[in-house]
Image: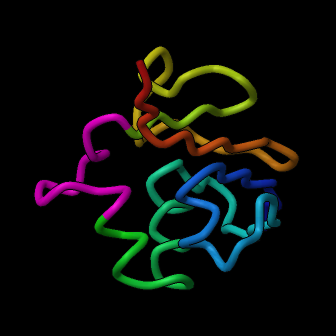
């Protein structure tokens, strides 16, 4: 088993029980997709609808970082996780 720290900010934090940081325990060899799926199982369909689109890809604007590196520069949702990794889930931000 591995343990990672997940940080969710802004609107995602509210969908995850108001917790900014939390610890996930995952099986060895887990990937980013498994971490996100575990969060969705824990916090329900509102979080799932916010993170994923109908094709089970990240919804538009959602950005995920592993240890400070955006997963699109790694292996996307198939990015492997290791014990002690940090995962940041960043929702779209608007402004003007």
Report which quarter residue 52 is drawn in.
bottom left
Query: Magenta region's main secondary structure?
Result: loop
Q: Is residue 92 above or below residue 95?
A: below
Question: Which residue: 26% across, 38% down?
Answer: 60
Question: Which residue: 74% across, 68% down?
Answer: 24
Q: What residue occupies the far left of the structure in this picture? A: 54
The residue lying toward the viewer, choosing from 8 and 14, is 14
Screen quadrant of the N terminus: bottom right
Screen quadrant of the C terminus: top left
The residue lying toward the viewer, choosing from 87 and 12, is 12
Is 93 positioned to the left or the right of 19 in the image? left
Is 13 positioned to the left or the right of 43 in the image? right
* Residue 15: x %, y % from top left: 54, 72
Q: What residue occupies the far front of the structure in this picture? A: 96
Q: Is residue 88 above or below residue 67?
A: below
The part of the chain drawn in magenta is 50-61
Magenta stretch holds residue 54: yes
Question: Which residue: 41% across, 42% down?
Answer: 77
């Amino acid at each position: 088993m591995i343990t990672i720290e997940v940080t969710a900010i802004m609107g995602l934090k509210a969908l995850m029980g108001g917790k900014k940081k939390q610890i996930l325990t995952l099986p060895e060899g887990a990937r980013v997709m498994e971490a996100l799926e575990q969060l969705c199982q824990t916090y329900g369909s509102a979080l799932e609808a916010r993170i994923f689109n109908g094709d089970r890809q990240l919804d538009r604007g959602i950005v995920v970082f592993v240890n400070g590196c955006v997963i699109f520069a790694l292996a996307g949702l198939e990015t492997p996780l290791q014990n002690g990794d940090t995962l940041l889930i960043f929702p779209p931000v608007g402004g003007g």
